[in-house]
């Protein structure tokens, strides 16, 4: 039986994956905020599961969950990073971190680096990071990661996507057997789009999602393929289609620079 950890596993694509792997008889650990959503998920997918309630926009909570996972499981076969809460504006958490950066990168950094041991103990370890690949190599403001000097949704989104690609370098340098995939759906997915956004974005997500969105169960089929037959190393995909990795002139250096900048803030 594999152990599959899914952040954001209570809703949307994370929940679709949780349902699939519970039905397949795997052990599924879901991290999210809503126990009620988790209980609803279990109603149609009984199996060996565990819910860990946590607000992953808080560094202390991400650390707590990672420690709990490390002490509970010697081996983690698959880690799916799908927690998402979209904020159009800059917002500080109670810890003083910029909330989007904290949820979409600091938390993922802590999970991927902190679970290196249990992932390394798996036969075919895989991390699927739902950070849409393809952001420009220069998307990171190394001197102002939390964008105190000027935030825009677009820049924040591009920065976390690029940072999550560089995180793959750190992870696979440490464990070359690890499959680290930055993945985004091929097109819009009909999910809850959890977040605090303006009426324009909310209405267009709702309308476009309803008209053009694919159901989460369909959208995650390629992710299931990746988890079940992972290829070691770093790759990028949109849907089932492999995308070339975005490469910049100084990727290894940038990954190390990112890690030290982040460590200083943690
Ligand atoms: N939907 C799309 O069309 C689309 C397109 C491109 C990329 N993506 C990416 O795919 C991933 C999944 O998206 P989705 O649309 O399936 O998500 P979603 O339906 O909005 O669900 C978000 C999940 O994240 C959890 N979550 C939110 N804030 C959290 C927090 N502070 N701490 C812990 N968990 C938290 C929610 O759990 P609780 O409610 O229990 O807190 C829920 O399980 C995201 O990375 C998203 O950016 C989605």
Image (tube, rainbow, N blue to C red):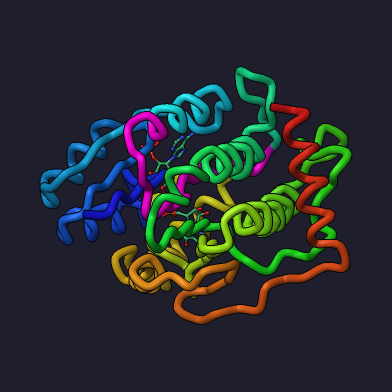
Residue 34: x and y in percent read 32, 32
Residue 94: x and y in percent read 61, 18
* Relative side of 253 to 114, left or right: right
Q: Is residue 76 magenta?
A: yes
Q: Is residue 197 visible?
A: no
Is 98 above or below relative to 113?
above
Residue 101: x and y in percent read 66, 39
Question: Quarter of the image containing the C terminus?
Answer: top right
| Residue at 52% in and 40% down | 111
* Relative side of 60 to 70, left or right: right
| Residue at 60% in and 78% down | 243
| Residue at 16% in and 44% down | 48
Q: Nearer the viewer, residue 162 or 109?
A: 109
Q: Is residue 13 magenta?
A: no
| Residue at 37% in and 73% down | 229
Give the image quarter of residue 234.
bottom right
Q: Which residues are magenta?
A: 69-89
Q: Is residue 200 visible?
A: yes
């Amino acid at each position: 039986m594999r152990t599959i950890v899914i952040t954001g596993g209570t809703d949307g694509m994370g929940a679709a994956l949780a349902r699939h792997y519970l039905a397949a008889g795997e052990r599924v650990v879901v991290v999210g905020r809503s126990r009620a959503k988790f209980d609803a998920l279990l109603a149609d997918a009984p199996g060996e599961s565990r819910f860990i309630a946590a607000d992953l926009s808080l560094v202390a909570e991400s650390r707590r969950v990672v420690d709990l996972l490390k002490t509970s499981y010697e081996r983690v076969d698959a880690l799916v990073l799908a927690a998402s809460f979209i904020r159009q504006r800059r917002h500080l958490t109670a810890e003083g971190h910029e909330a989007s950066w904290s949820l979409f990168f600091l938390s993922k950094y802590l999970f991927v680096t902190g679970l290196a041991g249990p992932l390394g103990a798996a036969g075919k370890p895989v991390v699927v990071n739902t950070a849409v690949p393809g952001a420009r190599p220069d998307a990171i403001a190394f001197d102002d990661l939390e964008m105190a000097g000027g935030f825009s949704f677009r820049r924040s989104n591009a920065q976390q996507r690029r940072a999550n690609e560089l995180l793959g370098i750190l992870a696979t340098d440490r464990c070359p057997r690890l499959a680290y995939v930055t993945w985004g759906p091929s097109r819009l997915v009909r999910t809850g789009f959890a977040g605090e956004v303006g009426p324009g974005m909310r209405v267009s997500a709702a309308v476009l999602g309803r008209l053009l969105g694919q159901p989460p169960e369909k959208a995650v089929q390629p992710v299931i393929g990746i988890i079940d037959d992972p290829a070691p190393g770093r790759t990028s995909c949109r849907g089932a289609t492999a995308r070339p990795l975005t490469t910049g002139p100084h990727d290894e250096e940038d990954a190390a620079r990112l890690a030290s900048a982040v460590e200083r803030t943690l």
